[in-house]
Amino acid sequence: MISINSLTVAYGGFTLLNDINFHISENDKIGLVGKNGAGKSTILKLICGLQSPTSGKVAVPAGVKIGYLPQIMEHHKGKSVIDETMTAFADMYALEDELEKVTAELASREDYESKEYQRLIERMNEINDSLTFTRSESPRVQAERTLIGLGFKFEELDRPTETFSQGWNMRIELAKILLSKPDVLLLDEPTNHLDIESIEWLEGYLKDYRGSLVLISHDRKFLDNITNRTVEIMLGRIHDYKVPYSKYLELRKERIAQQMAAYENQQRMIEKTEEFIERFRYKPTKSNQVQSRIKQLEKLERVEVDEEDSSALTVKFPPAPRSGDVVFKASDLTVGYGTKVVFSGAEIEVRRGEKVALVGRNGEGKTTLMRVIMRELEPLGGEARTGHNVNIGYYAQNQEDILNKEDTVFETLDRIAVGDVRTKLRDILAAFLFKGEDIDKKVAVLSGGERARLAMAKLMLKPYNLLALDEPTNHMDIRSKDILKQALKSYDGTLIVVSHDRDFLDGLVDKLYEFRNGKVKEHLGTVAEFLEQRKLESLNELERHIKPAQEPVSAEVKDKKNAAIQEYQAKKYVSKEEKKRKNRIAFLEKAIGEIEEKMKSIESRLQSPTADDDIMELTREYLELKRDLDAKTEEWVSLDS
């Protein structure tokens, strides 16, 4: 369908894409992967004709309709959400107008045998065929279903678009693209502004989409569940795999290993051949063999190993100072802005060492709670307080406003660093992939991924015991996210994270607070368990809406039903408390094991200290761990008895 032929993109002396070739066929679902800055977004712009290559070409057949969602876009104002979304059907309405004109002209003519009359008949049939395809159901119904799937509430559809944030306006643009039913969809990070449930809805839509798709995403699960082909951009070249992302990683590893084995075998053969030539070069009796070997080497097609872009984010957070057992607690918390209440009656408790996710629809209060935790916003009611000796490292979602665009990368850290850490700034920046001349770049010219990494680097300057991270992985590539996740898993402090990335949260957190319809609900367990529960609740809600009217029931039956409901709710409460107890026991057992390992390490160092060991500091640390161990063991015994 679309061919990319010998395409090169160069800027000055730098080649971004080097002589790449690939073909997009009908029904291809392609995941376009690579590091930030590898050229993924550039390829989408080239396909759309928004950018021209240095050489080569992109061939798009006439009549092929392309739908393109960029990362950053201009949003339309002056209409309601539903009216703006309905502009997606402009082509259909134009066809209806044309059909009306053609029908009127046919009714007024009597030259039934003329070519012009036949042409009008053919055009009427063409329009009817097109409208039959696009008018499978009411455009309004399609628009409403798509908007609600993307997270809008029904009562919000008549609100003006300018009363919504940039993220919500992106959803309107996405809805318009999906409803226009293009032949080829080009989506550049469509999940960046979606919550988990909207991502799942979009995932289902794209699975059933009958057309070609080229998708840029840093959500591994999203790629795996939708794509059937992975095109990797690495160091200006592409590698095409006819498999989803996780399988591509396996095949890529195998390909590199096979190339390396073939390369090493060939190098051994070349080395032996060159030894033979050097040894017998001047012996007349071996001259024919020597010449044969020389020609053999000249004709040899050398095996090359694909160069790997091995730079990656390597992060280890500083050890967390000890805080109180309760790190953050909210009781009957009501939060909002002025007279607008965002959520109310919230009961939240985060204990030392827990890793907790805040999830839910955008605008329901996740970032608002972060502002309460940071004391940037006072509650409207109830109580919110941080625990004893809590020191917070905060990663804000709006890095555009937090980072000074006039500072360089190095100055961003240098302005806030104090003490010995000032001598390590270049090492910290190198760990976040800012090397050489990169540290002298102005913040203003950094990409979204680079700004995210720089903001995260700021958290390395001080040993925090609570990390409050608001959408930390937006714009980060998959490898950077994986290594950040591993660093957070091994971080020994407390974590509160706002994220819609299922793969990032999976295995990282074991408790979630869901923000929904002005309330905050605690969910114990994994992200996968939470999503499964939400699906069941959604199905039950749907059943309630479509359930047929029933015959009136007697008072006796009502009483029995109410008693059964009360019994069920009581059991559910006990079950939840039991699950909470078991989760806490598991957490304590893990923490106790980790403390005991640290104590063993200190004991061995105290038995055989080196000149660099500070005996007083080691002893102080050992006693601190011992107190922590005693407290956790005592709590474990009380819960397990």
Image (cartoon, rainbow, N blue to C red):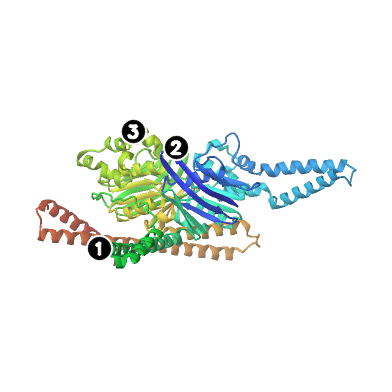
Residue in the image at 48% along x and 38% along y: 340
Q: Which class describes the residues within 10 Å of circle 2: few (<14), some (14-19), or many (20+)? A: few
Q: Earlier in the sequence, mark 3 or mark 1?
A: 3
Instruction: Tell whether 634 sits left or right of 112.
Output: left
Q: Which residue is mark 2?
A: 337
Q: Decide: is 408 above or below 638.
A: above
Q: CA distance from mark 3 to mark 1?
A: 44 Å
Q: Is residue 138 above or below residue 413?
A: below
Q: Residues within 10 Å of mark 1 (few under 14, many from 20)?
A: few
**In the picture provided, is 462 more to the left or to the right than 337?**
left
Image quarter of residue 88: top right
Q: Residues within 10 Å of mark 3 (few under 14, many from 20)?
A: some
The residue furthest front is 284
Q: Secondary structure at mark 2?
A: strand
The answer to whether any part of residue 497 appears in the image is yes
Q: What amino acid is labelled 2 in the image? A: Tyr
- Disc nearest the viewer among 2 and 1: 1
Q: Position of residue 240 (x, y in %)?
A: 48, 56
Above or below, 520 against 278 in this view is above
Q: Quadrant of residue 282?
A: bottom left
Residue 17: x %, y % from top left:
46, 46
Q: Would you name the residue on which mark 3 appears?
A: 407
Question: Tag 2 or tag 3, which sits nearer the N-term?
Answer: 2
Label 2 vs 1, first from the N-terminus: 2
Under mark 1, the amino acid is Gly
Q: What residue is disc 1 on?
A: 593
Q: Position of residue 599 (x, y in %)?
A: 18, 60
Front residue of 603/347: it is 603
Alpha-carbon span between mark 3 and mark 2: 32 Å
Q: Name the residue at 20% across, 39% down.
A: 419
- Residue 518 visible to the viewer: no
Instruction: Determine the CA span between mark 2 and mark 1.
Output: 44 Å
